[in-house]
Image: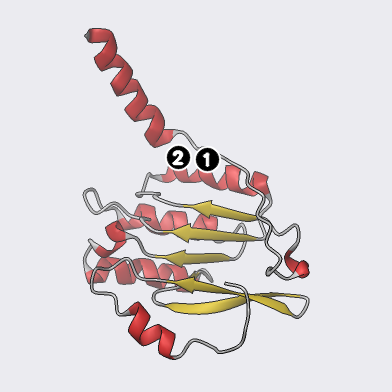
Amino acid sequence: LILFVLYIAIELIRSNTYIQVEEFTFKNELVPDEFDGCKIVHISDFHNQGENFTDRLVKKTEEQNPDYIFITGDICDSMRTDIDDANYFIEKISAVAPCYLIWGNHDYNVTDDERQQMWDCAEKNGVTVLESNYTTIEKNGESVFLVGTSSHMNSQFTVDMLEDFPQKQGYF
């Protein structure tokens, strides 16, 4: 029983501090040829891990030499919120490559003021926040759409955003 409890404790620590890198190759005939070889780093569930973890994550991200970084929610942790740690992460990761961010459920469970502080930091550091809106990324005259939906339970994404969605055909 003691070994089992020790194993669970070690696994909880490891799973919350280990940075895992997995590589995937995505091929689809609808993606413009100009994006062949494009490298994207996807980061999710950061949960304001602190400066030490941020520095290791940024180093690991730099090693991947990404064209873009997609951050898909939970920069902060609503149960142990530290906006300074979240903003430190935004500042450091945005220096690596162009970043695109959508908020996660933990990011919506902080105060409006705290989320605004993160948004301001993202804006200041050139991070594109996609909250029920879209943008395009372009390479050599070709583009793909990036669409960000809200994780917030009261999201009006399908009603509000899709009314203005461009009719141009493209990959997204």
Q: CA distance from mark 2 to mark 1?
A: 6 Å
Left or right: where does residue 1 sit relative to residue 104? left
Left or right: where does residue 99 sit relative to residue 157? right
Q: Where is residue 128 shown, x and y percent of the image?
A: 50, 72
Q: Where is residue 15 shown, x and y percent of the image?
A: 39, 32
Neighbor class of circle 2 (other Cα within 10 Å; few <14, some 14-19, many 20+) is: few
Which dot marks residue 52? 2
**Quadrant location, the C terminus:** bottom right
Q: Residue furthest front?
A: 29
Residue at 23%, 74% (x, y): give it: 154
> Which amino acid lies under the numbered mark 1 shown in the image of this protein?
Arg
Q: Quadrant of residue 115?
A: bottom left
Identify the residue under disc 1. Answer: 56
Residue at 67%, 60% (x, y): give it: 67
* Mark 2 element type: helix
Q: Where is residue 62 shown, x and y percent of the image?
A: 64, 48
Residue at 52%, 55% (x, y): give it: 92
> Which amino acid lies under the numbered mark 2 shown in the image of this protein?
Asn
Residue at 38%, 36% (x, y): give it: 16
Q: Where is residue 93 shown, x and y percent of the image?
A: 53, 56
Closest to the observer, 132 or 170: 170
Q: Where is 145 relative to 104, above or below?
A: below
